[in-house]
Image (spheres, rainbow, N blue to C red):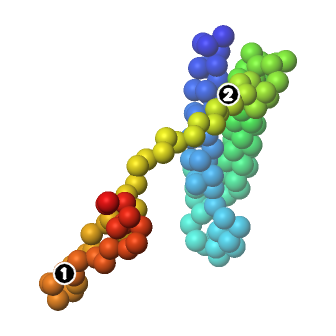
Amino acid sequence: MQILMTLTLVVQILSALVMIVLVLMQHGKGADMGASFGSGASGSLFGATGSANFLSRSTAVAATLFFVTTLMMAYFGNRGNSGDGGLMEKLAAPAPVASVAAPAKSVAPLSQIPALPAAGGTSRPAKPTASAAAGTK
C-alpha cells in the first residue's frame, strides 16, 4: 500500500512539473497577432499552428493526470480512517482541574515596611501607626 502511495506521489509531482513547463512554453493570445505580421512564430518547431494544438493538448493531459493522482492520494490517505469519526472525536476529554487554594503567605503589614529613600538621597523613617505600636508592646 505504501509503495502505491509513493508511486502516486511521484507521478503527481512529475505531472505538476510537466504542466508548469508546458504552460510556460505556450504563447499568449497576443502572440498570434504578432505571428500574422511576420514576428517569426510561424517558423516554430511544430509549424504555424501545430505548437498551440500540441502544447494545449499536452497541458490538458498533464492536468488530468495531476487531478487523478490527487484524487487517488486523497482516497488512499483517507482509506484507513473510515468509521473512526472526526479529529475532535478522537481527542480525549481533558481531566478536570482540581481547585487548589494557594497557601497563605505571611505578609508584613504596610506599617512595618520601611520607607523608600526620597529623591534627594535623604530617607525619613516611617511614622509608626497605632497598630504597629500596639503590636510591639
Q: Residue at x 19, y 81 (%)?
A: 123
Q: Is residue 106 visible?
A: yes
Where 122 sits versus 74, above or below?
below
Q: Is residue 110 visible?
A: no
**137 on left or right of 12:** left
Q: Mark 2 falls on what kind of element?
A: loop
Which image quarter: residue 131?
A: bottom left
Which image quarter: residue 80?
A: top right
Label 2 is placed on what type of residue? Ala
Q: Residue at x 73, y 28 (%)?
A: 93
Q: Quadrant of the N terminus?
A: top right
Camera-side residue of 40 and 71:
71
Counting residues from the start of the chain, the first of labels 1 and 2 encountered is 2
Residue denoted by label 2:
95
Label 1 is placed on what type of residue? Ser
Mark in front: 1 vs 2: 1
Q: Residue at x 28, y 76 (%)?
A: 126
Where 94 sits versus 123, above or below?
above
Residue denoted by label 1:
123
Crowd around label 2: few <14 · some 14–19 · many ≥20 (10 Å): few
Q: Residue furthest right?
A: 83
Q: Residue at x 61, y 40 (%)?
A: 16
